[in-house]
């Protein structure tokens, strides 16, 4: 459909990949955007029935997190939303007591930067 014919706000039209996340988050950046990592695990602490009055995306997040912890990246994939938008929604649910989260544990044995540089130099010399 052309933008110049018909109703541009018809309900069956897809508004595009960026409009929906903006609308879902109401244009907010969210408090937990910097705290939540894409690997942060989220679990519901309230039931699906308690979340039934929430907006569709919020209720779906609570439903997905009922049985097991789910990463923020998995939620974004299930909801077909941008990661930043899901972080805002998850942050709202954390603040309202529907979810809890655990950040990924940092790797204890991080590689030595000098060793990595030596390997890179060795590869470049080949």
Image: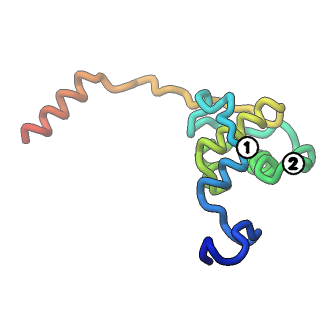
Distance from disc 2 to disc 1, alpha carbons, whole Å, reads: 23 Å
Q: Earlier in the sequence, mark 2 or mark 1?
A: 1
Q: Is residue 123 left or right of residue 3?
A: left
Q: Tag 2's secondary structure?
A: loop
Q: In this view, does 109 lie to the left or right of 32?
A: left
Does the rendering let one see residue 100? yes
Tell me: residue 9, above or below residue 39.
below
Circle 1 residue: 26
Q: In this view, does 16 lie above or below 101?
A: below
- The image shows residue 68 at horizontal and vertical percentages of 72, 44
Q: Quadrant of residue 46?
A: top right
Q: Residue furthest left?
A: 125
Quarter of the image with the N terminus is: bottom right
Instruction: Write down the residue under mark 2.
Output: 48
Q: Which mark is residue 65?
A: none
Q: Which of 98 and 118 is in front in this view?
A: 98
The image quarter in which residue 87 lies: top right
CA neighbours of label 1 inside 10 A, class few (<14), some (14 to 19), many (20+): few
């Amino acid at each position: 459909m052309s933008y110049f014919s018909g109703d541009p706000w018809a309900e069956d039209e897809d508004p595009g990949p960026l409009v929906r996340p903006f609308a879902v988050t109401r244009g907010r950046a969210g408090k937990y955007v910097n705290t939540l990592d894409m690997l942060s695990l989220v679990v519901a602490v309230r039931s699906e029935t308690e979340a039934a009055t929430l907006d569709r995306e919020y209720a779906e997040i609570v439903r997905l997190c009922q049985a097991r912890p789910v990463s923020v990246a998995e939620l974004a994939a299930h909801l077909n939303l941008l990661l930043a938008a899901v972080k805002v929604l998850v942050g709202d649910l954390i603040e309202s007591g529907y979810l809890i989260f655990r950040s990924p544990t940092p790797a204890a044995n991080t590689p030595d930067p000098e060793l990595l540089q030596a390997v890179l130099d060795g590869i470049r010399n080949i």
